[in-house]
């Protein structure tokens, strides 16, 4: 592990149980258990009894996995490129939700297969798509480390300014993420997730179980994607400065698994938006997170996490004493 990653990981203290409980009590009069669950995490992560909602960002990381490589150059027709342009143009469901909750979207090219076709607004942080994890390690340890460091640097950059950054809401797009998630969950939990219904993902999960869990960095290199690395670093960086992070589905959840292996205290800074799909239930069980919504919402590109933001506003309003 690099000096930067180790320093950030070691700087992450436990979320404040006292502040979290005070924030929960402040919203209890609303009689809404989901608001209490959210206030508990936000107050604990921000280390305040009055959770903040102002100045938040939606970060969407795009990254392609070798396990999902179509085998031909698809250019502008690549699924990741199409999804990225929908977000950039404002036609994606996420973009409409972001406008409704007045929250900017930061689009990251963490390592796409067709980077020259990404929207011009995308911030390039990646070193390209990964290799096929079924044949060889998806990344080198160096590439995985650089991805983590890029995510940490991104967190620090986004935190600059006033008022202080209140929270980050995460999403991810890219092909092959489901296969990588199955492998990571298998390796970290030691079990093949139930009902994958995808032969390639089941093989990857068994490969993960057989590999075991030597360290978060090694597993990230073996099975993760470029967006997994950047998002894991982003989570670590955010937690180190007391900024809570809202997860969407399994791609962001996989990044949280890796971040949790590197710095276990990071789980106190995570909000699970919803139950998700595919491997997300197994991820939440392992991390000990209870979702705000018990149903699956969206496809993990960030729309499910964005739907939590109006609830964040309610928590902030209820927790603010009236004069």
Image (cartoon, helix red, strand yellow):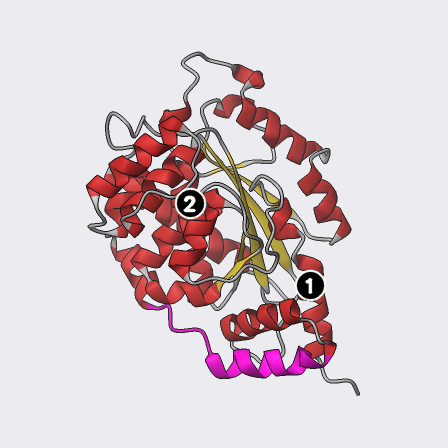
Q: Position of residue 164 (x, y in %)?
A: 59, 67
Left or right of residue 204: residue 75 = right
As displayed, is residue 171 above or below residue 158? above
In the image, which disc is placed on residue 99? Answer: none
Q: Position of residue 100 (x, y in %)?
A: 77, 50
Mark 1 lies on residue: 311
> Secondary structure beneath disc 2?
helix
In the image, which disc is placed on residue 230? Answer: 2
Asked if disc 1 and disc 2 are in contact, CB closer than 8 Å, the reply is no
Q: Residue furthest front?
A: 195
User: For the stretch drawn in magenta, what is the main secondary structure?
Assistant: helix
Query: Residue at image x 60%, y 25%?
Result: 82
As displayed, is residue 136 above or below residue 146? above
Q: Position of residue 235 (x, y in %)?
A: 44, 56
Q: Start and end of the magenta stretch?
A: 11-29
Query: Residue at image x 62%, y 48%?
Result: 304
Foreground residue, 280 or 318? 280
Q: Position of residue 169 (x, y in %)?
A: 57, 53
Q: Residues within 10 Å of mark 2 (few under 14, many from 20)?
A: many
> Secondary structure beneath disc 1?
helix
Query: Residue at image x 30%, y 63%?
Result: 7
The reply to whether residue 224 is visible in this rendering is: no
């Amino acid at each position: 592990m690099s000096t930067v990653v180790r320093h950030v990981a070691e700087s992450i203290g436990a979320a404040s149980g006292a502040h979290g409980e005070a924030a929960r009590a402040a919203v209890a009069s609303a009689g809404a258990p989901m608001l209490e669950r959210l206030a508990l995490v936000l107050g604990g992560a921000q280390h305040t009894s009055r959770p903040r909602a102002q100045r938040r960002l939606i970060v969407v990381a795009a990254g392609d996995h070798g396990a999902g490589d179509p085998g031909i150059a698809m250019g502008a027709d690549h699924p990741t490129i199409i999804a990225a342009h929908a977000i950039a143009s404002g036609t994606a469901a996420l973009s409409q939700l972001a406008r409704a909750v007045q929250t900017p979207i930061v689009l990251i090219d963490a390592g796409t297969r067709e980077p020259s076709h990404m929207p011009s607004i995308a911030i390039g942080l990646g070193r390209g798509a990964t290799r096929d994890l079924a044949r060889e390690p998806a990344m080198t340890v160096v590439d995985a480390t650089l991805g983590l460091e890029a995510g940490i640097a991104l967190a620090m950059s986004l935190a600059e300014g006033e008022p202080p950054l209140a929270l980050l809401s995460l999403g991810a797009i890219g092909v092959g993420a489901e296969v990588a998630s199955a492998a990571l969950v298998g390796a970290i939990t030691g079990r093949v997730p139930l009902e994958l219904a995808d032969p390639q993902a089941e093989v990857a999960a068994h490969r993960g179980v057989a590999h075991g869990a030597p360290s978060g960095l090694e597993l990230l290199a073996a099975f993760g994607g470029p967006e997994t690395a950047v998002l894991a670093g982003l989570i670590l960086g955010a937690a180190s400065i007391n900024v809570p992070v809202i997860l969407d589905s399994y791609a962001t959840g996989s990044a949280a698994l890796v971040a949790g292996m590197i710095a276990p205290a990071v789980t106190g800074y995570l909000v699970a938006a919803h139950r998700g799909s595919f491997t997300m239930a197994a991820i939440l069980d392992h991390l000990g997170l209870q979702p705000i919504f018990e149903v699956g919402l969206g496809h993990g590109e960030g729309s499910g996490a964005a739907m939590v933001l109006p609830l964040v506003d309610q928590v902030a309003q209820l927790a603010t004493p009236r004069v």
